[in-house]
Image (tube, rainbow, N blue to C red):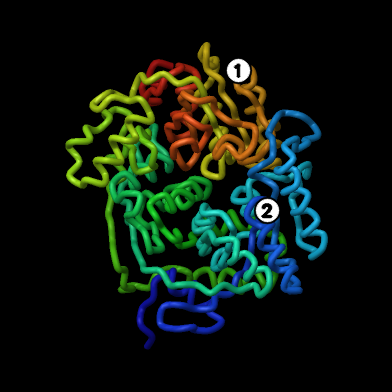
Amino acid sequence: MSAPRTLYRKLVDSHTVAALDAQNVLLFCDLHLMNEYTSPQAFAGLHAAGRGVPVPGQNVAVVSHIIPTHPVRHRVIQDPPSALQATNLKANCDRHGIPLFDTNDPLQGIEHVVAPEHGMVRPGMVILCGDSHTTTYGALGALGFGIGTSEVEHVLATQTLAYRLARDMRIRVDGALPPGTTAKDLVLCLISRIGAQGARGYVVEFCGAAIEALSVEARFTLCNMAVEAGARGALIAPDDKAVAYVLERAPDIAGEVRAQALAHWATLRSDEGAPFDVEHRLDAAGVAPFVTWGTSPDQAVAVTGTVPLPQSLPDPVQRASAEQALRYTGLAPGAALDGVPVQHVFIGSCTNARIEDLREVARVVGTRRVAEGVRAMVVPGSGAVRRQAEEEGIAQRLQAAGFEWRQPGCSMCLAMNDDVLAPGQRCASTTNRNFEGRQGRGAITHLMSPAMAAAAAVTGRIIDVRRLESTA
């Protein structure tokens, strides 16, 4: 009888073409996603070596990071270097027969939103992309992780990757999330507890009653941000919710293929007694709405809490990091986060720009209006999400409230386009990173859930959304 295995090891074993040594394997890639900013050098290296792309149908490209999101019918990338990146991507995809969601494709969007919504992501797959938030796909029981440009070239040429094995971590979240809290609050809470390097070198498997209760889109948020704790991957064993999500979006899975797929997917869970190197437990009942106060996603506290005192942190590295973060954000040690004014609200990114996120924003906003002096932007994760929000009346409600309703793209998540904050502006953001200058040089980012961002938009300050809703 074989030894019990974790879900992670099952996925690696089923995709191992060859063992290179005790710690490295040649891993087969089921789906390779590309964007315009990590692929140009890879294609250049490929062409210089005279190589082609042997399996173009298992590669998909998206223009997402450098694209403007202004609400115009036909988008034109005005920045010459950015326009060149998009043009080169199209030329490379045309040359090799790789499917592309181009600038004005009605289904264009962020890669980590587009791929699952079109049924490209299925349980048991290995998915690679030149973007760190490829961990998102673990929500469907697929092993996804980001790779570098040289690795992009290798995958294009061989559909494989020389891969160093990770260790196994399990995070069990029991109980139920209280009203007013979401997967975003849960993951910010987890990261604040284990630290930005707490899962470094590990693939994390999430389990427990609170995880089972999450919708698939909420699981995307959770797995997306696992990388902010240093995780090399994130996984949730596929259950009935995940299977239903995939089958609804993948009509090609039918007949005998469907029966075989369901039988295989049922095996995608960690065996009883499978060894994990590290385990953590959390009671979801104790999770509150979370907000970051510093310049790293682990520098976060409940919105009811206060900015920590750097001198109270025992680790000298953490203490120095906190001191620098407070210098950058302009917050005082011991200060309350609830009530801090914001000048900008950004709702979008591969973390929180799906239809469920936008429904939650519209629910919190209700009949309120964006506060005076606040600029609030909503950037749907894809053309499909945008269209659905318009059909449901979400877009119209948010526009009536004073929100800007934008075209899909990464937008202000990372300031690689013309959606950039000015120095000193403070932004309530549903994105995944709050590094110095991430949304613009000198700009200050506070990560939070879509509900919390909506509350900030209509009040002009960071506020506990539960308190706002209790007065509605």
The disc label shown at residue 118, or none: 2
Mark 2 Cα-neighbour bin, 10 Å: few <14, some 14–19, many ≥20? some
Earlier-in-chain disc, 2 versus 1: 2
Image quadrant where residue 354 sits: top right
Q: Is residue 80 above or below residue 92?
A: above
Image quarter of the N terminus: bottom left
Foreground residue among 143 and 313: 313
| Disc 2/disc 1 C-alpha distance (Å) | 31 Å
Q: Which residue is mark 1?
A: 402
Q: Is residue 243 visible?
A: yes
Relative vertical location of residue 14 with respect to residue 235 in this rendering, above or below:
below
Q: Can you give x and y, in whole percent of width and height, for residue 388 in the image?
A: 68, 37
Q: Position of residue 16 (x, y in %)?
A: 53, 79
Residue at (71, 60) in percent of width and height: 251
* Nearest-to-viewer mark from 2 and 1: 1
State the image quarter where residue 30 is shown.
Answer: bottom right
The residue located at (68%, 51%) in the rendering is: 36
Q: Amino acid at mark 2?
A: His
Q: Could you say where residue 346 lies in the image, as x and y percent from the top left?
A: 54, 30
Give the amino acid at mark 1. Gly
Residue name at image x 71 percent, y 63 percent = 43
Residue lying farthest to the top in this orientation = 372
Position of residue 146 in the picture relative to residue 395 (left or right): left
Quadrant of residue 109 within the rendered picture: top right
Residue plotted at (33% across, 73% down): 274
- Asked if disc 2 and disc 1 are in contact, CB closer than 8 Å, the reply is no
